[in-house]
Image (tube, grey):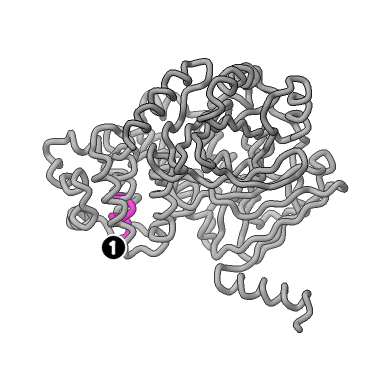
Amino acid sequence: MMPRSLFFLLLTFICGSLFGQMIVIQGQAKDYAGKELTFYTYREPVSHQQTKLATTTIGQDGLFTLTFPSAQTIEVYADLEKFRGTLVVEPGAHYQIDLPPYSQRTVQEAASPYFEPQLYWLGLKDTKPTEINFLVRVFLTEYNRELSVHTVDIYQKKSADTAKAIIARLEKNYPYKNYNYLNILKLYSYADLEFAVSQTDRDRVIQKYFAKRKIALEHPAYQRLFSILFSDYLLYKSQDIKQKNIYVPAMQGDFKGFTNKLTKIGYQQEVAELVAVKCFYDGYYSGKFDKNLMLNGLTEAMELSSYQPLKEVLPGIIRKITQLQEGSQTPSLQLRNQQNVKTSLSAKGKYIYLAFFRSDSKACRTELDSLVIIYKKLNPILTVLPVSLDQNFSLATKLWAEKKYPWDLVTATDAEKARTDYEVKSLPAFYLISADMKLSLSPALAPSHNFEGLFLKIYREGRRGR
């Protein structure tokens, strides 16, 4: 039998060979002891979903190690309550990092869908002036300083000469030649600046910086400007009488026909495919185009795309659209109770009123109290299932002891996955699930907003339809 140490060494080698070289992130942060630390990235600019890279629980001594493979240089992130830590990592590199002092979000911040953690560049031990994080931060500091000093000329006067002068100064001071990641950062920072002074000429910037260039799918600077330029692009172009015929195939969900039109006006094939996917995705949510046609376009893209990185992320883009549609299958949800017994979400012949909450939220506690009335009235036909997303489960345990709620207290075994799968932006959040584990209301009304009346209507119609 192969020794375990040799097995894991071989496994690491295989993973590194297939998916890129292994990246190691280590550190010590005693004030985070016992807390979960997750690093993620963004792989595409269409739906801009998080892709989890690695997760660990920080030891009681504050030590942590995370390992994951990557075939290219990427920017990674870690949500740290009030901060979002960020770091640029290269394949095969080993990083010793410092986390910011632990600072928990307030109850109001945690409940707000508008709260944005402050971006925090994670500290690196023994950073050299040639290390990529140092170079990125130096360039961005200078770039942002230029924007700040010349705000009026750029954003009010729309001065192209000012933009050109800024770019010339930055190129002189930061002539990185051998750093592809940095060159892409510079290119799309300059493109962003050019667009700021010529926003009425979106197509000129697109032709210069996107249509004929190689895609940098996972680079944040590329993603940011792509999202700005191509957000609701189909809606915008469908109203352009001169170019509307180019976008008719897109409005019909015709991936092949649309990409052929784009390549004829100068787009490279891979770029045309990415633009088509963005148009279908935004078109689905716009309310102006047939949703089934937009979804058909994405499905066809997954079958016909010649750009392999796009084919790899398309299932996630399509899942983002379909997974919480009413009538779709309910995302799986793993739970555990106070006795650490694990279960999974199951209807067991009744409707489920799923409620995500956080114990230190006044709004959540108010709705939990309202749930008691619904439970007492509808228990024979409706399972009330509040799920704690507290970082500290003991807070929920204390609340249950005080309130003596008539349900078993459960928490999601992976709170971040639950938030992502159910797109929980703020708490409380509610869903109604049918007896066959389909989403009946997504999201559902809160108990205090006449959920009971709407549920009884759905229940009676379901009974008549049998």
State the residue in front, 399 or 147: 399
In the picture, measured across the screen, residue 383 lies left or right of residue 312, that is: right
State the residue in front, 104 or 454: 454
Is residue 256 visible in this depiction of the protein?
yes
In the picture, measured across the screen, residue 451 lies left or right of residue 92, that is: left
Q: Residue furthest right?
A: 61
Percent across and percent down for residue 428 are: 57, 26
Task: Give, as a single range, the part of the protein colored magenta.
Answer: 270-276
Is 54 above or below relative to 2?
A: above
Is 458 above or below relative to 261?
A: above
Magenta: main secondary structure = helix
The quarter in which the N terminus is drawn is bottom right
**Residue 272 shown in magenta:** yes
At x 41%, y 30%, the residue is 154
Q: Quadrant of residue 53?
A: bottom right
At x 53%, y 24%, the residue is 378
**Residue 379 shown in magenta:** no
Is residue 167 visible in this depiction of the protein?
no
| Amino acid tagged 1 | Leu
Q: Secondary structure at mark 1?
A: helix
| Residue at the spot of label 1 | 304
At x 27%, y 40%, the residue is 291
Is 270 above or below relative to 345?
A: below
